[in-house]
Image (cartoon, grey):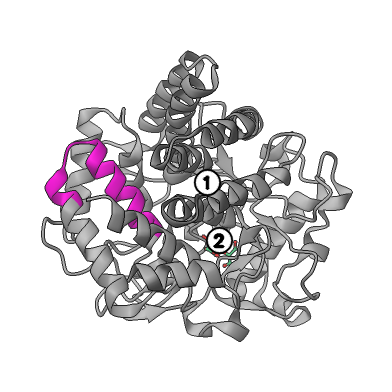
Amino acid sequence: MSRLALATLDGNWEHDHTVPSRTLYPHQWSWDSAFIAIGLAHVRPDRAWQELGTLFAAQWADGRVPHIVFNPRLRVGAYFPGPEFWDSAAADGAPAAATSGIVQPPVHALAAWLVHRRGPSAASRAALAELYPGLVAQQRYLAQRRDVAGGGLACVVHPWESGLDNSPAWDAPMAAVPAEAETMRAYRRHDTAHADAAHRPTDLDYARYLAMVQSYRAGRYRDDDLADRHPFLVECPLFNAARGAAEHALASIATVVGADPEPHRERAARITAALVERLFDPATGTFRPRDVRTGRLVPARTVLGLTPLMLPDLPAPQVAAVLAEACSARFGLAGRMDRPLPSHDRTAADFDPLRYWRGPSWMNINWLVWRGLRAHGRPELAAGLRRSMIDLVAGAGCHEYFHPDTGAGLGSPAFSWTAALLLDALAEV
Ligand code: 9WN
């Protein structure tokens, strides 16, 4: 199995980065590269550092790490929306490389720390020292430019920033974004040429995705006055838990590179407190995204609500609540479980086992929860989840996502983060 994973990563290597998938996603993606680096650390450590280095070479002057770095060698139309749609060159502080203007969950500091920990050496310490200022700037950007509500949490301005594009979590806030499916007649979607359209977001979803990019792009991707002019502003539990986990990782990195870990610990504590304060609903015992435009928590109970478990300092009552939700029939976590966690509540009326982030199981989310279970001293549950992840890939291969009941592979068949995180799961007992 590790041979298949390695072959998948090697096959997706592209001169200085790894593509998530040769067909569907032929450029470099931000959080994919972090997960990929975690896996590469086991088999190709030099490449792990190069992966992160290439991504951070495209960091914007304001600290944002773009969600896509476009490969200039590819033909126009290799992915939609491509560099011409994003037009990053027209924005202040954009790098020389063409990129998107939005971000993804900041899991990179955690990745850098894990890559180093896998094989500490003079070279890994030098790599950490080189990345550290960029990782700090990434966090500063999110804290200072994206805290639209002023409560200590960063907003996502687009569902693509969450990484869980068409999660039912975004249905309510997306409904307020004016757009019509017919707009898509003017464009050519790339995803539906390579994957089953019935598994992908709909044309109406895509029309709204484009409208949100156009709104942000019209302001040259500036973040001032977002509350007055942007149609989608949501505080996401996964995105903010990743920020907190990043500060914990930065505290560890700081001790290696000779910086002060204390400010990172303080920020981590503030993020965890804000997450509990703003996104935990005591009535249902769940973490849910907050729509900043309406002030309300979204109704859907998705797997996003389990991800704060990745925070080592999550308070005991919230740990207990997340575990109760995870072990309920909604998600099915257990010491012995047939399939990993689905992306959405199995008991919900809109649970869809085939459509992208609306039901299928994904390795990265399961991996994040697995780490959380270990951090919070639940080895039995962690072992059950790990076994289910390994069995899934053993049965279906390194697919992008999986049918949550049958385990059948869906989406791209040679997907990088599935391969990378499998390597990590295999290595850590
Ligand atoms: C848009 C690359 C990316 C992942 C996301 C996943 C999907 C893109 C798309 O693919 O999003 O960014 O075209 O659907 O949702 O998490 O980073 O693998």
Q: CA distance from mark 2 to mark 1?
A: 23 Å
Instruction: Give whichever of discs 2 and 1 has the lower sequence position.
Output: 1
User: Residue 330, can we see it?
Assistant: no
Q: In the picture shown, does residue 409 fall above or below 131?
A: below
Magenta highlight range: 364-382
Q: Secondary structure at mark 1?
A: loop
- Which quadrant would the N terminus be assigned to in this image? bottom left
Which labelled disc corresponds to residue 135? none
Q: Where in the figure is residue 350, as x and y percent of width and height?
A: 35, 70
Say which residue label 2 marks: 175
Q: Residue at left 72%, top 68%?
A: 81
Q: Residues within 10 Å of mark 2 (few under 14, many from 20)?
A: few
Q: Marks 2 and 1: which is nearer the front?
A: 1
Q: Position of residue 337 (x, y in %)?
A: 15, 64
Amino acid at pointer 2: Ala
Question: Residue 234: in sight, yes or no?
Answer: yes
Mark 1, ligand 1, within 8 Å: the answer is no
Q: Which residue is mark 1?
A: 105
Residue shown at 35% from the left, 54% from the top: 424
Q: Main secondary structure of the magenta part?
A: helix
Q: Please tell me whether residue 108 is drawn above or below residue 314 in the rendered image.
A: below
